[in-house]
């Protein structure tokens, strides 16, 4: 079954997300937005943790997590410690869910339509992993961009 591989890859991604957030020089730099960049590293972190807690924890594992996607992009100036806690909550949701998901669940459609279409659960889990890593790359770019001082 693919779940042990997914657990390992999500764990690696969440470790990288933690490293990226810890690499910001201070809390304020996580929330800076420069011209040409739509989202701060802090907002992308909130988006990723909300995404995983919703789609894995809440939808597949009935965790009770209630997502506010709009707030993931509007809330600002949360301290790094709170963001790191959200990463740990997402890690727990991922592991708890994937340890319990059955082969039958993986083979069936995901319970919610994604972009208006029903998709296979296994496919959607791989998609969520690629989504995580895509945004981690954006956070890495953002962190390096805001860390540069003008000449």
Image (cartoon, rainbow, N blue to C red):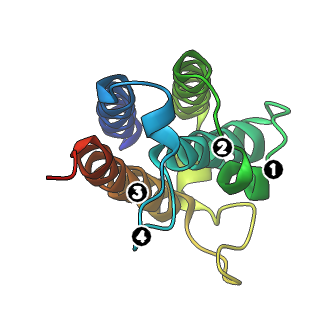
Per the model, the C-alpha gap separating discs 4 and 1 is 26 Å
Picture residue at 41% right of the left edge, 24% below the top? 26
User: Helix, strand, or loop for circle 2?
Assistant: helix
Nearer the observer, disc 2 or disc 4? 4
Picture residue at 54% right of the left edge, 32% below the top? 94
The residue under label 1 is: 68
Q: Which mark is residue 50?
A: 2
Picture residue at 67% right of the left edge, 42% below the top? 76
Q: Quadrant of the N terminus?
A: top left
Nearer the observer, disc 3 or disc 4? 4
Q: Earlier in the sequence, mark 2 or mark 1?
A: 2
Badge 2 vs badge 1, beta-carbon distance below 8 Å: yes
The residue sitting at the left extreme is 151
The residue under label 3 is: 126
Per the model, the C-alpha gap separating discs 2 and 4 is 26 Å
Near mark 1 (Cα within 10 A), the count class, few <14, some 14-19 or many ≥20, is few
The residue under label 4 is: 35
Q: Earlier in the sequence, mark 4 or mark 1?
A: 4
Residue 18, image x, y percentages: 38, 26
Near mark 4 (Cα within 10 A), the count class, few <14, some 14-19 or many ≥20, is few
Per the model, the C-alpha gap separating discs 3 and 4 is 32 Å
Per the model, the C-alpha gap separating discs 2 and 1 is 8 Å
């Amino acid at each position: 079954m693919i779940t042990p591989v997914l657990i390992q890859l999500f764990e690696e991604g969440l470790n990288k997300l933690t490293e990226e957030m810890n690499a910001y020089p201070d809390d304020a730099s996580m929330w800076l937005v420069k011209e040409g960049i739509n989202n701060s590293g802090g907002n992308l972190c909130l988006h990723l943790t909300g995404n995983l807690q919703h789609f894995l924890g809440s939808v597949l594992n009935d965790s009770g997590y209630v997502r506010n996607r709009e707030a993931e992009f509007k809330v600002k100036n949360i301290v790094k410690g709170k963001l790191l806690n959200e990463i740990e909550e997402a890690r727990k949701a991922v592991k708890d869910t994937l340890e319990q998901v059955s082969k039958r669940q993986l083979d069936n459609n995901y319970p919610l339509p994604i972009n208006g279409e029903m998709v296979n659960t296994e496919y959607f889990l791989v998609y969520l992993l690629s989504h995580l890593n895509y945004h981690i790359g954006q956070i890495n770019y953002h962190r390096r961009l805001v860390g540069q001082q003008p000449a």
